Image (tube, grey):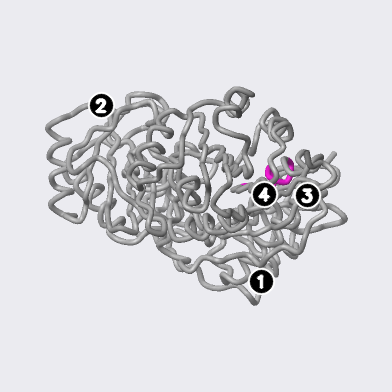
Amino acid sequence: MRKKNVVIEKVPVSGYAAEGKALARHDGKVIFIEGGVMPGDIVDVRLSKNKKDWAEGKAVHIHSYSDKRITPFCQHFGTCGGCKWQMMPYSLQLEYKQQQVADHLQRIGKLELPAMSPILGSAHTEHYRNKLEFTFSNKAYLTNEEVRALNGEIPVRPALGFHVPKLFDKVLDINTCYLMQEPVNLIRNTIREYAIQHELSFYDIRLQEGWLRNLVVRLCTTGEIMVNLVVHHEDKENRVALLDHLLKTVPAITTLLYTINPKKNDSIFDLDPKVYFGKGYAEEKLEDFVFKIGPKSFFQTNTYQGEVLYKVTRDFAGLTGSEIVYDLYCGTGSIGIFVSRQAGKVVGIELIKEAIDDARENAARNQVGNAEFFAGDVVDICDDAFFAHHGQPDVIITDPPRAGMHEKLVNKLLEIAAPKIVYVSCNPATQARDLALLDALYTVEKVQPVDMFPHTHHIENVVLLKKRENNQQ
């Protein structure tokens, strides 16, 4: 019997695997390890899963540290879970991310690949995000060290911060977060202090009661700041007092909204945010294009690297001014608009109608007259009549969510058989799966990893596919 909850001692960590888990080998078995360790560390691992050829576990003790390890800059490192690679030099993070892309494309895709371009690192490794979402809780999460220091007397205090990984009802109270520039910490801490001082109730996710639920802050490179306070129910007197206090304390806020969410889940996409102050949206720029971002809009959360990612996409498309470009999963139209000046025509398709409304408005705001946007499923929209009206695509740009493209869409792309496909992915594993299917008609011409999220294992990857010459129609 292969036991779990056993501790294997003094295991050398050798590398990284999928989802940022550290990798080790012991007695011929691969062990995937969580717990803030890195290659070069020697650790004790408590197993949570123990199979014949592999196991999973958490590092419970580090005997010795890698000589490449550096001191994390955040006091919440190791508990928050948001920036798990702070203990690694950024140059080493990039090496592992590049290797992750290569491993996925080769192991899952089994593809014949060109030489991969060196990963494009982020010029900003701190304060690079333009959006953060914080959660209120009536019971702050305490680390084991904090519990031991309290000698068994556990206080119940509220928290405003991030969910602890894999614990849906545990929120870590955040003092300083380095993911976004100021005044994000001032905004969050001002609201928390005021709420505690005035005995406003923080939400209890288990009991589904309490008033303050979520706080969403967006800070654009234009300097605009949009804040959305999400509460469980209306309480006008306290709401007005709190929002007025926030505006007085942080006058840099350009748009302040509130959203009433009585549901069990935290999603606001089916709710109606109310404008309390300002124009109700923020404006962000990519190159000289200006984009309207509402409280429910999707936009790349790293504006600086988003621009780099889109430049790679535009370069891979190789546009000369006459091409018809189909932009799939177009969202609010940012990629299509970004490439519009080099294209003859842009056709954007997105399932979410509200995003298409934003895309049309963004095109109008930027005086882009050669782009059209359509709400619906690509598989349903792209029929013979649609192509007869809008033209067959010369280039397809696809930027799907982490789950990748549905197999029906992959088959549709094989049916459309455009000369070029530029595949932008936030998950090289699902990208590799899709590329293996597209290999029936396309070859991989270029591969360019782009790091959007320093200190995390996440990586974006752009691939250029060209139709095989012997399949040209």
Real-space CA distance between mark 4 and mark 2, rounded to the nearest whole angstrom: 41 Å
Q: Is residue 164 magenta?
A: no
Q: Quadrant of residue 438?
A: top right
> SS at mark 4?
helix
Q: Position of residue 44 (x, y in %)?
A: 69, 59
Instruction: Name which residue type carries label 4.
Output: Pro
- N-terminal-most mark, 4 or 3: 4
> SS at mark 2?
loop
Residue 401 visible in image = no
Q: Horizontal placement of 172 versus 278: left or right?
A: right
Q: Position of residue 140 (x, y in %)?
A: 38, 45
| Residue 470 versus residue 268 in the image, above or below | below
Q: Nearer the viewer, mark 2 or mark 3?
A: 3
Q: Which residue is mark 4?
A: 428
Q: Horizontal placement of 29 versus 130: left or right?
A: right
Q: Position of residue 45 (x, y in %)?
A: 70, 55
Q: Nearer the viewer, mark 1 or mark 3?
A: 3
Instruction: Name which residue type carries label 3.
Output: Thr
Real-space CA distance between mark 1 and mark 3, rounded to the nearest whole angstrom: 46 Å
| Residue 86 versus residue 220 in the image, above or below | below
Q: Which residue is mark 1?
A: 64
Q: Are marks 4 and 3 in contact (CB under 8 Å)?
A: no
Residue nearest the viewer, comparing 160 with 289: 289
Q: Which residue is mark 2?
A: 233
Q: Nearer the viewer, mark 4 or mark 2?
A: 4
